[in-house]
Image: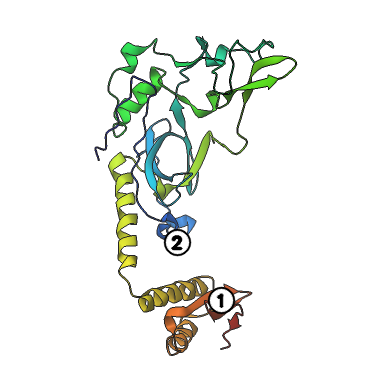
Amino acid sequence: MNKRAILSTKLHYILCINTKYNTKYSDFLGGYTKMSELKINRKKIPIGEVAYFIRQYKDKPHMYYVDYGTVEEHYATEIVLQLYVTKERRLINGIPYNDFTTPTEWRKLPKGWTYSTELYELDTDMSDYKIASRSFYVDNPEDIKAAIAEGLLVKIQDKDFSYIETEIDRKLGFRLIRKSDPYDYHPSWISRPYYEVFETYEEAQKKIFAIEAEYKRISELSDYDWSVELIDRALNRGIGLSIITEHQGEQIRDRLLAMDRVEDIEVRLYNGGIQWKYWKNKRWITIEL
């Protein structure tokens, strides 16, 4: 797939690359880092510059794509990003969406009306065709900054995400109203750990490739090896949280791997201890040292 996205001049303009992989990003998050060991280079991606990160699709959380924003602020372990979307281009009955007043006056349903009759016209504003017809590439920060400067991209908080709906009453007729989906949330700013924010598109893309490679590696494991890996992860968390010592972790590991059906064993940290069970069972058993 070509990594470069060109702004469409027909219906809408896209400055986002959709790279889809069957992945789970949580397995790639780094461990805890002491504040004194952090080495955030604030000059590498200064405030106001374009930065890249990866996101999950809302409807397909196992798939990822590279997104972008501009750096708003640096904190000790987080970088705050301002997000952008394409400018509003909807026209309602020839009127720019932001200028269209709702609710409209009640009107009589047109003659010959059926449930499939369109009661308003939805079109796309192409008045800035000469600017919008230029090619903008999402992997080029300068193109993104140009799109922002020319108004093709706007801050997400400056866009109206509502939609027009027809309200019909058997006594009054019909009118047009605005509605918003309460579950369609559009954050204006987000913060990401500094190690999840990248200077270039290619760096972010490599993160997606790494996720895909890790899941391919996991898919090649036997059930036994996968279970051992999960046991090791749980014990390492227990050691990291000082629930058990390294020596105790080795003892528990040896005991678990000596059991039957290791591939069916689950391990968890619970109430200051380590518990295990076979995945088909409901009862968790505490390992006593």
Question: Residue 169: x, y in percent?
Answer: 71, 20
Which of the pair 202/9 is nearer the observer?
Answer: 9
**Looking at numbered disc 1 in the image, what kind of residue is underneath it?**
Ile
- Would you identify the image quadrant in which residue 197 lies? top left
Q: Who's the residue at 38% across and 17% down the image?
A: 150
Residue, disc 2: 31
Q: Who's the residue at 45% across and 89% down the image?
A: 260
Q: Who's the residue at 45% across and 21% down the image?
A: 87
Question: Residue 37: x, y in percent?
Answer: 43, 57
Sequence-first tag of 2 and 1: 2
Q: Is residue 49 above or below residue 106?
A: below
Quadrant of the image for the C terminus?
A: bottom right
Residue, disc 1: 243
Q: What kind of element bears circle 1?
A: loop
Which of the pair 235/185 is nearer the observer?
Answer: 185
Q: Residues within 10 Å of mark 1 (few under 14, many from 20)?
A: some
Quadrant of the image for the N terminus?
A: top left
Q: How many marks?
A: 2
Q: Is residue 160 above or below residue 45?
A: above
Question: Residue 84: x, y in percent?
Answer: 45, 29
The residue sitting at the front extreme is 112
